[in-house]
Amino acid sequence: MRRVIVDYKKLNKDILNLLVEKFPDGYEDRDIIAFKNQHNETIEAVEVRTEDTIYLVKISKRLADTMQSFDDDDDDDTTPDADIPEGVEGDGDEDDMD
């Protein structure tokens, strides 16, 4: 079985689906796997599996945000917030163009 380490920036729709299915309410401390990479840095990840691959998805605040946005998108059929460039947010004061 292959083991693949994936950063949230490189998540595809299939892996996001697996994450949201396995952790519908988010992941907890007990779900986190910690290990050292080749640079002796500690990496924290959550695991999801397919028939032939174990994905270790690196944990970050952005991962949680991406999972939430993806789950909301799945429910609403809208574009996920993860596709909005960082720093681009509405200020809530939309001007009417009429």
Image (cartoon, rainbow, N blue to C red):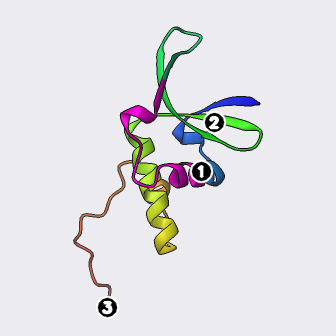
- Placement of the C terminus among the 4 image quadrants: bottom left
Residue 97: numbered disc: none
Q: Position of residue 50 (x, y in %)?
A: 70, 44
- Is residue 71 on the magenta stretch? no
N-term mark: 2 or 1: 1
Tell me the CA gap for discs 3 and 2: 50 Å
**Label 2 amino acid?**
Tyr
Q: As drawn, which residue projects farthest toward the front?
A: 30
Span highlighted in magenta in the image: 16-33
Tell me the CA gap for discs 2 and 1: 10 Å
**Label 1 amino acid?**
Leu
Identify which residue is drawn at 67% across, 31% down: 4
Relative depth, front residue between 22 and 73: 22
Q: How dense is the environment of label 1, judged by Cα within 10 Å: few (below 14), some, or many (20 and up)? A: some
> Is residue 85 at all visible to an observer of this figure?
no
**Relative side of 94 to 55, left or right:** left
**Relative side of 95 to 65, left or right:** left
Tell whether label 2 touches label 3 (CB within 8 Å): no
- Placement of the N terminus among the 4 image quadrants: top right
* On screen, residue 79 above or below 15: below
Element under label 2? strand
Q: Position of residue 84 (x, y in %)?
A: 45, 56
Tell me the mark number nearer the camera, choosing from 1 and 3. 1
**Label 3 amino acid?**
Asp
Count of numbered labels shown in the rendering: 3
Identify which residue is drawn at 37% across, 33% down: 29
Residue 55: numbered disc: 2
**Relative side of 15 to 59, left or right:** right
Element under label 3? loop
Judging by the rendered image, the residue that carries numbered circle 3 is 98
Relative depth, front residue between 80 and 59: 59
Judging by the rendered image, the residue that carries numbered circle 1 is 18
